[in-house]
Amino acid sequence: LRNCKKNQGKVLRNSNLGSLVIQNPNFTEKEICSYFLKMASAIGYLHEKDIIQGDVKLQNFILDTNKQIKLIDFGLAIKETETGEQWDNGRKIYYLPPNKLRNKAADIWGLGICLYEMCFLKRFPNIVELYSDKNKTQERISKEIRKNDISIKVQDLMLRCFEIEPESRITAMGIFDDPWIKEHLPFEVIEKFKIYTQPSLNLTELSHIAEE
């Protein structure tokens, strides 16, 4: 997703979303929602091509002068056919789901952490390592999210990203139909970014994604 045409905006200095959140701690829910949809669109595009990005975190989403988001760092990316094994030391445990399997659902867990960090301006707690029991882990995650002062709908979306069982976790495409997304963004914007997930689209065409 780094490929772009000559007339596209240049990448901003210190423009990864991790830095941006620190520099601008007063994002509205609508602004966070807009960024998150674009992030989900990038991951959705890869998933539709059966590619797992493998390192989904705010620092791997960068912003250009046109406020377009680009996904970078595919050093841990794999094809879906290679899934089934666990991550090795190449990925920090902080971003890993409980089963540590290399699959699309692991990318969604990473998106959930990104959303958590954008909304609450802090790192996701090390809950997974503290609780080996799945039910206790799920309950603790729910308590951690519900205690924060933010809308119920965005809390619900986070919890859908943090489902312990991978098959129960929301998909990248499912994010487009989430009530929180629909509440903050117009239908035509959501549909536009849904189009950009189609596997028939090439990377250069993705550069035409425009700010709503």
Image (cartoon, rainbow, N blue to C red):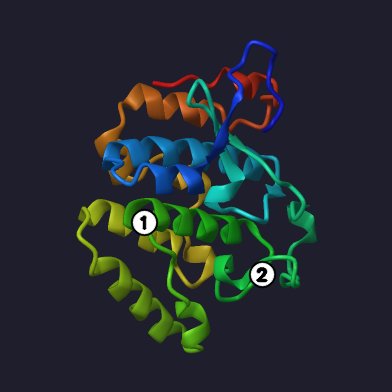
Q: Residue at the spot x=47%, y=77% of the render?
A: 126
Residue 115, how many percent across, how many down?
41, 52
* The N terminus: image quadrant: top right
Which of these two is toward me, 19 or 69?
19
Residue 142, compared with residue 35, is above or below; it is: below
Say how many tags the image has.
2
The residue shown at (64%, 10%) is 7
Mark positioned earlier in the residue sequence (1 or 2):
2
- Per the rendering, the mark at residue 121 is 1
Q: Residues within 10 Å of mark 1 (few under 14, many from 20)?
A: some
Helix, strand, or loop for circle 1? loop
Determine which quarter of the picture holds residue 183: top left
User: Dividing the image into 4 quarters, which one contains the C terminus?
Assistant: top left
Indicate the position of residue 123 as horizontal and vertical percent values: 44, 64
Residue 53 in the image: state x and y as whole percent.
67, 50
* Residue sitting at the far top: 7
Instruction: Give the class, few, some or many, for how many residues have Cα within 10 Å of label 2's Cα (few <14, many ≥20).
Output: some
Q: Which mark is residue 101?
A: 2
Q: Amino acid at mark 1?
A: Leu
